[in-house]
Image: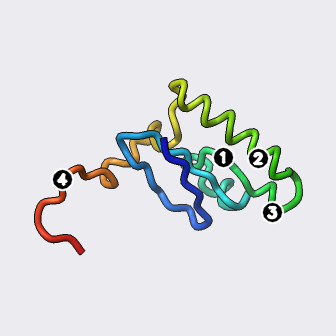
Amino acid sequence: MGVFTTGRGSVYGCKPMPCIKIASTSDLYQRMSDDMDLDAGGILDGSQTFEQVGRRLFELILAVASGERTRSEINGIGDEEFAPWMLGPTL
């Protein structure tokens, strides 16, 4: 499992493992709620503590490890990020 933080809204899936995406701002989470798994913006705006968001992340990690699908998995994102064998030169 991967946990990926984004401040600009990177659409990232990383198959074959689940990838939890954390939006660093609530504005980003609202704009991309179909693609983000967790809104951590409450830490910045003071509406939530670091511990509260950390607890939500911990619970989400446990849920995904138990089979709950991430937004990337639901949306089918990630095929392009995983390439087990790169053929030829890469830049």
Badge 1, how many Cα within 10 Å: few under 14, some, many 20+? many
Q: Amino acid at mark 3?
A: Leu
Residue located 68% across and 42% down the image: 57
Indicate left or right for 64 with 85 as reference: right
Task: Give above or below for 6 relative to 51.
Answer: below
What residue occupies the far right of the structure in this picture? 46
Q: Nearer the viewer, residue 89 or 12?
A: 89
Disc 1 to disc 2: CB gap under 8 Å:
yes
Where residue 22 sits in the image (x, y, percent)? Answer: 62, 52
Q: Residue at 62% of width from left, 49% of height from top?
A: 33
With 75 as the anchor, is 80 left or right in this view? left
All told, the count of numbered labels is 4
Viewport quadrant of the C terminus? bottom left
Whichever of callouts 2 and 3 sits on the residue coming sooner in the sequence is 3
Task: Label 2: state its secondary structure.
Answer: helix
Q: Which residue is mark 1?
A: 38
Tell me the mark number nearer the camera, choosing from 4 and 3: 4
Label 1 vs 3, first from the N-terminus: 1
Residue at point 59%, 57% (across, down): 5
For marks 1 and 4 on the same chain, the one whose residue lies earlier in the sequence: 1
Outermost residue, bottom direction?
A: 91
Query: How far apart are the two marked residues, 1 and 2, measured between alpha carbons?
Result: 9 Å
Point out which mark residue 53 bears.
Answer: 2
Residue at image mark 4: 85
Between 68 and 86, the one lying in front of the other is: 86
* Residue topped by disc 3: 44
Q: Amino acid at mark 4?
A: Trp
